[in-house]
Image (spheres, rainbow, N blue to C red):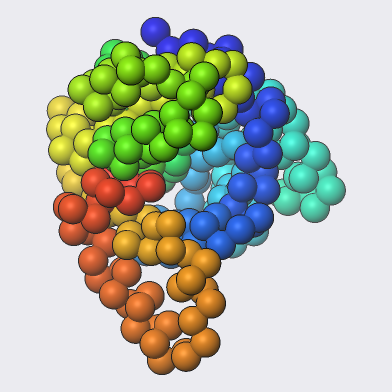
Amino acid sequence: MTDFEKVKGYYSVFDEKKRLSRDNSGRMEYEMTMGILKKYLPEKGKVLDIGGGAGAYAFPLAKAGYQVYLGDLSERLIEQAREQKAAENVENMISIDVVNATDMSRYEDGFFDAVIALGPFYHLTEREEREAFVSEIRRVLKPGGVVVAGFIPRLAGSIAIVERYLWDPEQVGAHTIEEVFSTGRFHNMASRGFQEGYYATASEMEEMFGACHFERECIRSIRGFAYEKEDKIYAIEDEVVFAEVMKCIEETAEDKAIVEMCGHAVYIGRK
């Protein structure tokens, strides 16, 4: 099973709170993801942000009027979220709790209008864990409720493991590369760096949610073909050209080839 202590250890030192604001890669991921949420979330209601870290999306949604419930495995990130809630007096952040995505028993059946799960599928290495998580998402959603589930596409994630070997070979061996390309599972050989990874294919995400009686709304990349080109794109000075590039990124976001080669993607479905 997934070694959740390793996952927590990673987020105890990695600055996840600032990940989306420290560079153009994070900036584009945040802006694109907020656009997706604006498009697919209901206009109001109760939202569960599970695996939501320190609340990068939870706080903006709460400030926009949603009643937000934030859960994450990391005690450090949850404490950061609690500190921000107190500092900013965000009343619509209803609860902030340490939660393992495979056990959401603290939440009632059919309680939420939407579930955002932009992190857990990155780390759940066992199929039984992923299926349990999908089942829990369905349980806590109201009929007609929407789920936005992030995943790291198999091909992009596997290639990134080869790149990881090139700059830190202590984290990756030949068997690591073989396993991630064939199964999607990544077990870091070192205690530093991203821990306990899982890289799913788009078809796997669709099949898994479909087996739990979700109707697919969309499977799309987040940064699309802008992935690893963010600095250059944001540096475009011609406003007309910039607008055209961003339009093309959005229009091609669901292309299967782009989905499998982008850094992050989302499955969007409805109960």
Q: Quadrant of the C terminus?
A: top left
The correct choice, above or below, for 21 with respect to 194 in the image is: below
The correct choice, above or below, for 181 with respect to 47 in the image is: above
Q: Is residue 63 visible?
A: yes
Q: Residue at x 27, y 35 (%)?
A: 154
Left or right of 65 on screen, residue 17: right
Q: Residue at x 38, y 47 (%)?
A: 263
Q: Nearer the viewer, residue 153 or 133?
A: 153
The correct choice, above or below, for 104 with respect to 68 in the image is: above
Question: Among all residues in the image, which is located at the extreme top?
Answer: 1
Left or right of 21 on screen, residue 239: left
Q: Position of residue 17 (x, y in %)?
A: 67, 43
Q: Quadrant of residue 116?
A: top left
Q: Nearer the viewer, residue 207 or 23?
A: 23
Q: Position of residue 215 (x, y in %)?
A: 18, 43
Q: Residue at x 61, y 47 (%)?
A: 19
Q: Is residue 78 visible?
A: no
Q: Residue at x 41, y 25 (%)?
A: 197
Q: Quadrant of residue 224?
A: bottom left
Q: Nearer the viewer, residue 238 or 151?
A: 238
Q: Quadrant of residue 12?
A: top right
Q: Quadrant of the N terminus?
A: top left
Q: Position of residue 150 (x, y in %)?
A: 38, 42
Question: Among all residues in the image, which is located at the extreme right?
Answer: 87
Left or right of 212 on screen, residue 97: right
